[in-house]
Amino acid sequence: MPTFTAHGLENLAHLIATRMGSEDVEAKEVADHLVRANLAGHDSHGVGMLPTYVRLLGDGLLVPNQVSDTVLDSGALLVIDAKRGYGQRAAGDAVRRAIAKAKELGACVLALRNASHIGRIGTYAELAIAHGCAFTSFVNVADHRDAQATWGAAEARLGTNPFTTGVPGPNGLPVVLDMATTTIAAGKARVAYNKGIAVADDCLIDADGNPTNDPTGFMRDKTGALRSFGTHKGGGLAIMCEIMAMAVAGGQGTVEHRNGGTLNSMLATIIDLTLLGGADHVAARAEATRAHIKSARPAPGFTEVLTPGEPERRYATKRLVAGIEVDPQSWADILEAATTLGIAAAEIERAVGSNAA
Ligand code: NAD
């Protein structure tokens, strides 16, 4: 399996984003975001997304260096329309502005509309947490074929609509729950398909609505659907993510016409913990809760009880040393996408070569 250092993959992602037309600051933010997702173990939202971004660019559905519109900046409300701009930059800029407002006013409600794919939402939670804030967001996915069958449905009607929330933990480590409302994120079906492996039980249904572990129908034939997690409750949360991001934040919804892009909209609240809770107090209480949860006896079949954020931290510790594996199909797709941008093999080697783990 091709394996690279984080630095090497970041160089490569920066090279590709630059050739897609992004100015340096944008290419850096995209590259940093994607590789952080790989480090956290979310290959679904890492450098494997680059071929999709190249396709979106070619189809005119992703706009590098886009300048977002500020639709409203009033009191604690900030409304931003990203107009298909690169999601990682549009969302990063919007969250940074929202943090500044929260620091001034105590809290900010951010409505971000119509950004191209904004990637791993936990990154924005971590950004707010690093500034002593609590973060909660509802995100929807539009402009794309439906991917999620909610409880009781035999076909898809929604995107994978992630829900994310987090607070500062002890020693500066964030406590973040960051999840698709489907049992697995769509990118994880892509990674399983690329690796030629089955997905776990309860993740997918086939074209007839029956459970399946084979991602081929969903990925290759565009049939079947990802299932909501947790029966009617996960499906209900997915529906509320759709309504919050589409109706309240004002972004595009899945009821609208699709062009085959990926548009994320987000309704986020950012609370400055200086006035409410106190960052150190929240961190101490979060740690007490974590320790209490982890003191439970593991259930049969489990060796320990984990809490949100622990798997990501373990991945990062391991991958920073051992490198990041990119499955052969994803790697071939990245190389093919780079070729369409006129990037020579030698340039790719220079970007990652000396950094291959
Ligand atoms: P996941 O199922 O791997 O993890 C979800 C959450 O559960 C995480 O907070 C994790 O820390 C926690 N967790 C994982 N295993 C655990 C365990 N054994 N015990 C306790 N907690 C555990 O993640 P996912 O749902 O596949 O989502 C992956 C990523 O996809 C997320 O970063 C999400 O933001 C992103 N996403 C983005 C979009 C988009 O359109 N931009 C859409 C969907 C998902």
Image (tube, rainbow, N blue to C red):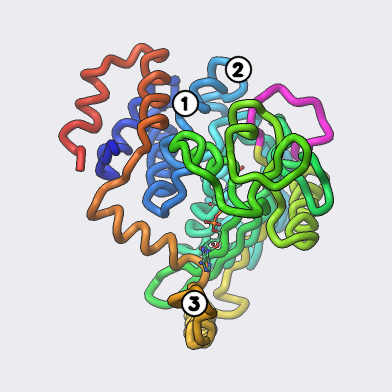
Residue in front for this viewpoint, 231 or 313: 231
**Direction left: furthest residue:** 354
Spatial CA span between label 1 and label 2: 14 Å
Q: Rounded to the nearest whole Å, what is the CA distance between mark 3 and mark 1?
A: 37 Å
Would you place residue 82 above or below residue 336 in this image?
Answer: below
Residue 331 appears in the picture as rendered:
yes
Residue 254 within the magenta-colored segment of the rendering:
yes
Q: Which sits earlier in the primary sequence, circle 3 or circle 1?
A: 1
Residue 174 position within the rendered picture, expressed as x and y whole percent measured from the top left? 46, 67
The residue under the point 54% across, 32% down is 86
Q: Report whether 146 appears left or right of 185.
A: right
Asked whether residue 313 is drawn in magenta, I would say: no
- The residue tagged 3 is 305
Residue 51: assigned label: 1
Disc nearer the start of the sequence (3/2)? 2
**Magenta: predominant secondary structure element?**
loop
What stretch of residues is rendered in magenta?
Answer: 250-263
Q: Circle 1: is it few (<14), some (14-19), or many (20+) Cα within 10 Å?
A: many
Q: What is the quadrant of the N terminus in the image?
A: top left
- Give percent across and percent down for residue 243: 81, 49
Circle nearer the viewer, 3 or 2: 3
185 vs 66: above or below: below
**In the image, what residue type sits under mark 2?**
Gly
- Residue drawn at point x = 19 percent, y = 31 percent: 353
Q: Nearer the viewer, mark 3 or mark 1?
A: 3
Answer yes or no: disc 3 within 8 Å of ligand 1: yes
Element under label 3?
loop
- The amino acid type of the residue labelled 1 equals Pro
Task: Estimate how packed mark 2 is, as few (under 14), some (14 to 19) or many (20 or more) residues with alpha carbons within 10 Å.
Answer: few
Q: Is 123 displayed left or right of 351 in the figure?
A: right
The quarter of the image holding the C terminus is top left
Residue 60's label in the rendered image is 2
